[in-house]
Amino acid sequence: MVPSAFVALEAFPLTPNGKLDRRALPVPEYGPESAGRAPRSPREEILAGLFAETLGIVNGSVSIDDDFFRLGGHSLLATKLVSRIRSTLDTELAVRQIFEAPTVAELATALDAATAARGRVVRAVRPARVPCRTRSSGCGSSSTWRARATPTTCRSR
């Protein structure tokens, strides 16, 4: 396992028994490392807000160059982020894309390419008469299927 944060200490806090006092350890800060660039488009602005919301960053200052995983994200939060992006932007996104494009800028570019390559799934109209399936599973061998696949066995309901 890889730690999600490192904190430099001059000395470890110890209990009176000489053991590590875990309660006295400082809480790591998962804020952005630098000021970074501001969002350039409405999509990047929405994505930066979703990054901040998912990661629990209070001031919401996520730049387009901040890495999701360096800000404290992990695979479960990536799944939550993908769900929020799908519902907010109404676009299809795989969890894998968060790992391949972990910054707001890279993810916005990936979403632009994905939207152009794949359209939305729309409901199709069902025909009044559905074609009959003459071959059913469990008929046995092909000779049995040929014997049973007569026009009289195929009836519309």
Image (tube, grey):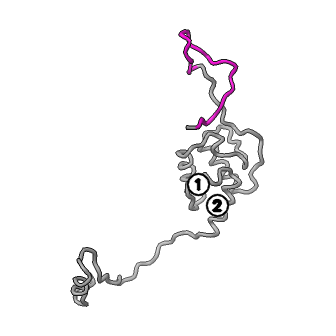
Residue 121 colored in magenta in the image: no
- Which type of secondary structure does the marked residue at label 1 adopt? helix
Residue 122: x, y in percent? 51, 71
On the rendered structure, is 119 left or right of 67? Answer: left
Q: Residue at x 62, y 39 (%)?
A: 72
Residue 50: which numbered mark, if any? none
Quarter-wise, where is residue 157 in the image? bottom left
Between 126 and 55, the one nearer to me in the picture: 55
Residue on which the image places disc 1: 85
Residue 15 colored in magenta in the image: yes
Between 53 and 34, the one nearer to me in the picture: 34
Q: Magenta segment, which residues?
A: 2-23
Near mark 2 (Cα within 10 A), the count class, few <14, some 14-19 or many ≥20, is some
Q: Are circles 2 and 1 on residues that touch, CB within 8 Å?
A: yes
Near mark 1 (Cα within 10 A), the count class, few <14, some 14-19 or many ≥20, is some
126 shown above or below 27:
below
Q: Residue at x 62, y 65 (%)?
A: 114
Q: Amino acid at mark 2?
A: Leu
Given this view, does label 2 or label 1 mark the residue nearer the observer?
2
Q: Amino acid at mark 1?
A: Ile
